[in-house]
Structures are given as C-alpha cells and as structure tokens.
Image: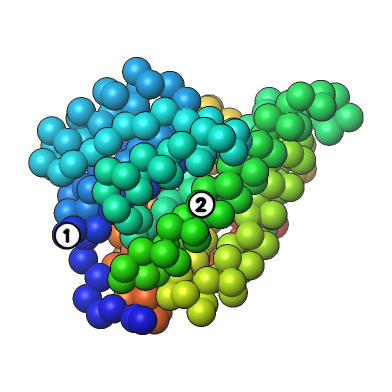
Amino acid sequence: MARAGQTGKGRIALVTGGGTGVGRAIAEALAAEGYAVVITGRRMEVLDASAAAIAGNTGATVKAVPCDIGDPLQVSSLFETIRTQFGRLDLLVNNAGSNTPAIPMEDLTFEQWNTVVAANLTGAFLCTQQALRLMKAQEPRGGRIINNGSISATTPRPHSAPYTATKHAITGLTKSTALDGRPFDIACGQIDIGNAATEMTSKMSSGVLQANGEIAAEPTIAVEHVANAVIYMASLPLDANVLTMTVMATKMPLVGRG
C-alpha cells in the first residue's frame, strides 16, 4: 500500500550510531522534519547529550536507547522498546559502523575482524530483521530502511579489508531487503558516502594513504549534505525508492585513477 506525501509528522525513525557524526546529523535532520527519533549506540552519556541537543534544537521527541547492535538480545530489546512506546516504526537508518587501523591484512587479528563484522554487517542485519517484523505487522503496514554503505561498498582503500568486505556485503543486504520487502510495502535503499566531514574523517585534511602508496590530503563535504540526501530518500512515497545514491566530495580521488 503506497502512501503519497511522505512527511515526517507523526512518523517514527530509528538511527543507529545516532549519537555522533553522520548519524547525529541524520537524526537531527529527521527531527527537524517532524519525526519522532530514536537514536542508539553503545555510550549512554553520548546518546543522552545528543538527544537533549537535538530535541532542544528541533522541539521533536528524541529518545536515546543504548544498544550494542551486534548482540541479538540487545537489538530485540531495542525494538521492543520502540514497539511499546511508539507502536510502529516508519524508518530505520542503519548507520552504525566500526573500522580498524589501516594495517596490512595479514596483521589483522581475528578479534579486529569480528568487531568490524559485528558492527557493520551483523548489526545491520539484526536491525533489519527486527524492522521487517515490525513493519509487516503494523497498521498501516510498511516502512523504509536506508543503509549507510559508504564509498567502500564499491571501491576499497588500502589496508581496509574488514571495512570494505562488510560494506560490499551491505549492498547485498540492501538488495535482498528491497526484494523481500516488496510484497509488504517495505522499501530499502543505500547511501554511499564519500568524505563527509566528521571526527572520524578529520585526518583526511592532513593526508591519507592512496592506492599508489602516496599520502595525500583529500577534500571533504559538510555532513549536512548527507543528511539532506537521507531526507530526500525518506520523503518518497513507498511506491518509489532510491536503491543506491552516492554523495561525495567532488574532488575526492575516486572516479578514474585519482
């Protein structure tokens, strides 16, 4: 059942990794559009501070719920909180992620690999699974899921095997979710972000390793551009979907050979 005129008023959104960086910017943009927003992450003090700031800036309902999204029991509890307190979920933004230091693949530990897989892939799967259950059962049924794929969903950086592998896998998860969600009015798309200016990407201005072995500074874009793109994707009626979108710094060394 497609619904025309998707506005934020009266709708519920969950943003994982919503306490900092891209996630916080997306959460604030959604709140400004009238969504009630749930943000989740592992650090309660960070979530509380972000929720208070976003609510103060927008006047929206913003709830902080701590959760390790790699833990199925914690994810189940998170979604039960949403179901109990809000009764439905209209938008899930799978944004949370983790990375390892840029070290050669053979030097990565098993623990480092597992940490990235749990945060970037398993967490997105667990949240998607719970969202599908809730979106199928609610009335009116349906909703939208937006996955943060990253430029690494198509193009790796040197020494980034765990991050790149999980982000490539997110593309598969996105397509599978879009397909499996079709009969239930559940749309799923992916946004691939290139060099949004956050604390995580601050080192880019001083130089990062390139594929040719050189160290070079890279341009960044304001994180608000990413948030605005998510707002556009979320604003579509459920009979329309942005399957993939790339938002990147125009001069970043991605297209071509640098």
Q: Secondary structure at mark 1?
A: loop
Q: Which residue is mark 2?
A: 130
Answer above or below: position of 126 versus 201.
below
- Residue 50 position, x and y percent, is 28, 29
Relative side of 204 to 161, left or right: left
Expressed as whole percent of the image width and height from the top left, the position of residue 35 reads 22, 53
Between disc 2 and disc 1, the foreground one is: 2
Which numbered marker is on residue 9?
1
Label 1: few (<14), some (14–19) or many (≥20) C-alpha neighbours in 10 Å: some
Determine which quarter of the picture holds residue 177: bottom right
Task: Identify the residue shown where x is 32% and y is 44%.
Answer: 84
Taking the spot 35% from the left edge, 56% from the top edge, the residue there is: 89
Name the residue nearer the viewer: 256 or 3.
3
Q: Secondary structure at mark 2?
A: helix
- In space, the residues marked 2 and 1 are separated at their CA atoms by 23 Å
On the question of residue 155 being in view, the answer is no
> Amino acid under label 2?
Gln
Which of the image's four quarters has the N terminus? bottom left
Give amino acid for label 1. Lys
**Label 2 CA crowd tier, 10 Å (few <14, some 14–19, many 20+):** some
Can residue 212 be seen at all in this image of the molecule?
A: yes
- State whether residue 43 is above or below residue 22: above
- Relative vertical location of residue 119 with respect to residue 247 in this rendering, above or below: above
Q: In which image quadrant can residue 239 be found?
A: bottom left
Q: Earlier in the sequence, mark 2 or mark 1?
A: 1
Frontmost residue, 43 versus 87: 87
Q: Position of residue 170 (x, y in %)?
A: 63, 55
State yes or no: discs 2 and 1 in contact (Cβ < 8 Å): no
In percent of the image, x 47 and y 25: which residue is there?
42
